[in-house]
Image (spheres, helix red, strand yellow):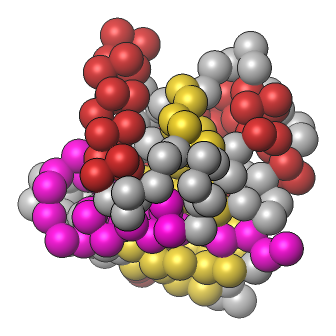
Amino acid sequence: MPTKYILHGGYTRYDNELNRSFFQELTKDVPNGGTVLIVLFATEEEKMEEYFGNFREKFDEHAGGKNIHYVQATKKDFLKQIKSADAIYIQGGDTEKLKRTLNEYSEFAYLIQGKTVAGSSAGAYVLSTYYYTNSQNKVLEGLGILPVRTVCHYQSEIHPAPDGVDPILDLNQFDKSLELVVLKDFEWRVFVV
């Protein structure tokens, strides 16, 4: 069974047509009674409960009336939670923190196979092979699960790259055989592999 990856350019918390269609796309293949695992490892501890509640509401609103079970990922039960999830949503935030946490689970890339896996901003970055981060103004390596080079927040007014920097030029210095994925805030793309 193929794996469906959805890379999102960032800021899923805003209510707009692109984000609504993103939530619909993520829940589209989840069966009635199925499970969505919400991964908030890139988020500050004190905001996790609030974010989980917000995302649960957004997914439910766009799930087409399906009865979906939502689970907040925990480090203790993460691998078991992945196995029982139909879809996984990886929220953005601190990319390095997220990468460190996911690197603790060597089976992660294997266990997500055959599922719908969505990542927003930092979540998209960790799935990618290379990514440009506005925060650090450089290209870094993701987990390499999806063979792409990614930039999120492209030409963003909310989270811009430093003045005079073109993230595409920076990413073009890395393995050009990998597809370049350029996402503005709220934009998203699907990859089925």
Q: Quadrant of the N terminus?
A: bottom right
Q: Quadrant of the C terminus?
A: bottom right
Q: Look at the picture and state if 131 lies above or below 1.
A: above
Front residue of 159 and 117: 117
Q: Residue at x 77, y 39 (%)?
A: 84
Specify whether 87 is left or right of 137.
right
Q: Residue at x 23, y 46 (%)?
A: 13
Quarter where residue 176 is shown = bottom right
Specify whether 124 is left or right of 160.
right
Q: Residue at x 38, y 63 (%)?
A: 64
Could one spot residue 60 in this view of the protein? yes
User: Is residue 130 rendered magenta in the image?
Assistant: no
Q: Residue furthest top?
A: 46
| x and y percentages locating residue 167 in the rendered image | 37, 71
| x and y percentages locating residue 121 in the rendered image | 41, 53
* Magenta span: 1-28
Could one spot residue 133 in this view of the protein? no
| x and y percentages locating residue 151 in the rendered image | 42, 68
Front residue of 53 and 99: 53
| x and y percentages locating residue 120 in the rendered image | 43, 54
Q: Residue furthest bottom?
A: 177
Q: Residue at x 48, y 47 (%)?
A: 67
Specify whether 154 is left or right of 189.
left
User: Is residue 9 rendered magenta in the image?
Assistant: yes
Q: Look at the picture and state if 95 lies above or below 156.
A: above
